[in-house]
């Protein structure tokens, strides 16, 4: 029973059904594991052990009455500190929200609770999800379980590190420009950003509303499929939630393999990419080819514009969304303010960290009169071209294969003083958010320094089943899903 914390959902479910162990024993195994590694990893910003055990007890009682709620009943799920869980802290890893407790559940949390999941802890992240290394947290940095001197990626670094280190069975993250996929790649786990509108954003603290999506992180593809099918569904509380028929992604994984064509965009394999990553992804592509997948080179000609376009649109939306943190209704209030203007300026000055301030200033600038047309409007037009690039590519292919990140996990502090270098880490993930498409990252190799390498599979809108199957196929024929960090 010692390695329950590293088991997958299907195995745990069988064990719970057959009474080989209880949900409380499972939760205790995850708690013990967390206690033993958390001093090194710092994946959590908050965790309530008693509350988790209470939820696990309730799960055991349901099962004893023959009222199990299904695959998630009793499974510990870690939550990024940006999603509202009733009566739990919600700080987005910011001093701005110190002391804030959420009065309601996000829709994805409601769905998880209805499925019997044990909501386990608050996971560290870059402040307000702005960053690629989890170094922008007001509550300490998170270490990469594969090399404690390295960053876990970001902004969902806590969500990725916790899954990788066995501190949760699966976790929820959010992805605005790569924040699920990039940390998943850097920590050697699976992470998926669904199609925009598939998962409700109600109860997710908004960073850039036209880009944000909630999604799963897990140690294998099937667990991500199971988590995804639990949190999807139309939500009248989110005006961007789409009314798409509910799909059983996990059972789609077992259907016979379809003949599929995979597109390889030439722009994603040029300068700036780490050689070992390039080789690992090319090797994976060769494997697909040898298994009968058709491979086709494609072009996404506006790829080089993705980073600048993203940093205009995302910061513009952030500057507007974060205006609500003004020290009046809630959030940190400065003790030194002598009038209402100082309440705003001093509270925001004290509460927000460097990177968040940088983004608010940039976003305010690109929206200001005189610059709006030159920057914001122009970026929106280029966003349409980026979307069209994908539409043209998907006329020929079923999915697109790219690296997830141009480099493996880098050393703590390495890019912290160079925002541009940090922004470039998202070069392969950002276009997917701009186009609203689904994409996942899965482990496809290890570097010579024993750091994980991730590959990205991008799908058509609502192509989740296809990309999960493509990833599952690779996973079932390779050993990467069984590799664990030694901590
Ligand atoms: N790293 C990107 C940024 O800093 C993406 C963040 C995200 O997806 N939340 O904006």
Image: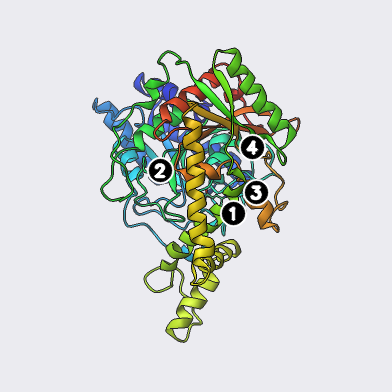
Name the front one of labels 3 and 1. 1
Element type where label 4 sits in the image: helix
Name the front one of labels 1 and 2. 1
Residue that carries the numbered disc 2 in the rendered image: 196
Q: Earlier in the sequence, mark 3 or mark 4?
A: 4
Q: Position of residue 365 (x, y in %)?
A: 54, 68
Q: Residues within 10 Å of mark 4 (few under 14, many from 20)?
A: some
How far is the residue under mark 4 from the one under mark 2?
A: 24 Å
Q: Earlier in the sequence, mark 4 or mark 2?
A: 2
Q: Earlier in the sequence, mark 3 or mark 1?
A: 1
Residue that carries the numbered disc 1 in the rendered image: 308
* Quarter holding residue 281: top right
Horizontally, is 87 left or right of 176 in the view?
left
Horizontally, is 156 left or right of 147 in the view?
left
The answer to whether one can see residue 249 in this image is yes
Horizontally, is 273 left or right of 190 in the view?
right
Q: Nearer the viewer, residue 209 or 36?
A: 209
Element type where label 1 sits in the image: helix
Residue that carries the numbered disc 4 in the rendered image: 267
Disc 4 beta carbon < 8 A from ligand 1?
Answer: no
Badges 4 and 1: C-beta atoms under 8 Å apart? no
| Badge number at residue 7 | none
Q: Residues within 10 Å of mark 2 (few under 14, many from 20)?
A: many
């Amino acid at each position: 029973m010692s390695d329950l914390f590293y088991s997958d959902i299907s195995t745990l479910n069988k064990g719970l059904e057959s009474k080989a162990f209880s949900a409380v024993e499972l939760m205790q195994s995850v708690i013990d594991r967390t206690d033993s590694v958390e001093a090194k990893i710092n994946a959590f910003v908050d965790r309530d052990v008693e509350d988790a055990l209470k939820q696990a007890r309730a799960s055991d009682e349901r099962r004893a009455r023959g009222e199990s709620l299904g695959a998630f009943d009793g499974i510990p799920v870690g939550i990024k500190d940006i999603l509202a869980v009733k009566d739990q802290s919600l700080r987005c890893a910011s001093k701005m929200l110190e002391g804030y407790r959420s009065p309601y559940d996000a829709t994805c949390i409601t769905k998880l609770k209805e499925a019997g999941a044990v909501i386990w802890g608050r996971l560290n992240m870059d402040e307000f999800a702005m960053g690629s290394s989890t170094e922008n947290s007001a509550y300490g940095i998170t270490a990469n379980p594969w090399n404690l001197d390295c960053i876990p990626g970001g902004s969902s670094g806590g969500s990725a590190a916790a899954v990788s280190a066995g501190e949760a069975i699966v976790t929820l993250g959010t992805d605005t420009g790569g924040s699920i996929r990039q940390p998943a790649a850097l920590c050697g786990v699976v992470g998926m950003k669904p199609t925009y509108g598939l998962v409700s954003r109600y109860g997710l603290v908004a960073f850039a509303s036209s880009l944000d999506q909630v999604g799963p992180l897990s140690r294998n593809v099937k667990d991500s499929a199971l988590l995804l099918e639990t949190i999807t569904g139309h939500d009248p509380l989110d005006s961007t939630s789409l009314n798409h028929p509910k799909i059983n992604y996990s059972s789609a994984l077992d259907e016979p393999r379809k003949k599929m064509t995979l597109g390889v965009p030439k722009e994603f394999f040029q300068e700036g990419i780490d050689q070992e990553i390039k080789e690992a992804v090319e090797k994976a592509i060769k494997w697909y080819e040898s298994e009968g997948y058709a491979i086709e080179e494609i072009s996404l000609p506006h790829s080089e514009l993705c980073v600048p376009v993203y940093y205009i649109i995302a910061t513009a939306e952030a500057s507007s969304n974060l205006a609500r943190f003004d020290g009046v209704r809630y959030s940190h209030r400065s003790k030194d303010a002598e009038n209402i203007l100082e309440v705003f300026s001093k509270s925001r000055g004290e509460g927000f960290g460097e990177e968040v301030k940088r983004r608010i200033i940039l976003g305010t600038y690109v929206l200001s009169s005189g610059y709006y047309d030159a920057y914001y409007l122009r970026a929106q037009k280029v966003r349409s071209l980026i979307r069209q690039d994908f539409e043209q590519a998907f006329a020929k292919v079923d999915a697109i294969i790219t690296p997830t990140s141009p480099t493996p996990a880098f050393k703590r502090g390495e890019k912290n003083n160079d925002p541009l270098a940090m922004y470039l880490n998202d070069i392969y993930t950002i276009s997917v958010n701009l186009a609203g498409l689904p994409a996942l990252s899965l482990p496809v190799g290890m570097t010579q320094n024993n750091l994980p390498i991730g590959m990205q599979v991008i799908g058509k809108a609502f192509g989740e089943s296809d990309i999960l199957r493509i990833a599952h196929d690779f996973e079932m024929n390779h050993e990467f899903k069984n590799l664990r960090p030694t901590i």
